[in-house]
Amino acid sequence: MMTEEESFRLAPLTLAYIGDAVWELEVRTSLVVTGERLPNRLHTRAVAMVRAKAQADRLYAVIERLTDRERDVVRKGRNAKSGSIPKNAKMSDYRASTGLEALFGYLFMSQQEARLKEVVGWLLDLSQQA
C-alpha cells in the first residue's frame, strides 16, 4: 500500500472514494455477524448506517477521540469540493460524511489496520446504542 505520509498527501476525495468502500464493507460485515440474514433487512439497515446524516452524526460523536493528524484528514475531506451532493442530504452532513470517509481511506491506505478497526468499532458501537 502506502506510507502514512503518502496516504496523507492523497487528494481528500480519493481517500473518501476508498473510505466509502471500507465503511460499506465494515457495516455489511457487522450486520451479518450480528445475525441479520434477510437481504431486505440487511439492505435497509446498511443504508441507514451509511447515509450522510448517520455518518455525520457518528463523526461528531467521536471527533474528540481522533488524533490531530486524523482530524486534519477529516477537515481536508470535509472541505473538499465534490461535484454534487445526494438529493436527500444536507450539504453540511454530506461534507462531514466525506471527511469521515476520507479518514477511513487514509487509515486503510496507510495500513493502520488496528487504528481503523478501533475507529470503526467506536462507530459501530454507536449504532448498537441507538
Image (cartoon, rainbow, N blue to C red):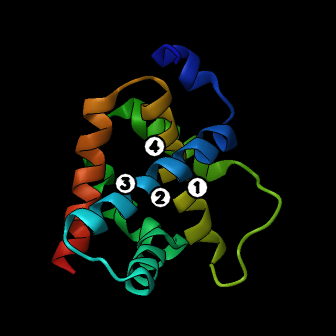
**What residue would you read off at disc 3?**
26
| Among the two numbered marks 4 and 2 on one chain, the one whose residue lies closer to the N terminus | 2
Q: In this rendered view, identify the residue nearer to me: 5 or 23.
A: 23
**What residue would you read off at disc 1?**
98
In the rendered view, does 84 fall on the left or right side of 15?
right
For residue 104, which numbered disc appears in the image? 4
- In the rendered image, the vertical position of residue 12 relative to residue 4, given as above or below: below
Picture residue at 39% right of the left edge, 78% below the top: 42
- In the rendered image, the vertical position of residue 11 relative to residue 103, given as above or below: above
- In the rendered image, the vertical position of residue 67 relative to residue 56, given as above or below: above
Tags 3 and 2 in contact by the CB under 8 Å rule? yes
Q: x%, y% of residue 79? A: 65, 50
Tags 4 and 2 in contact by the CB under 8 Å rule? no
| Among the two numbered marks 4 and 3 on one chain, the one whose residue lies closer to the N terminus | 3
Kind of residue at badge 3: Glu
Quarter of the rendering occupied by the C terminus? bottom left
**Front disc: 4 or 1:** 4
Kind of residue at badge 4: Phe
CA gap between label 4 and label 2 equals 11 Å
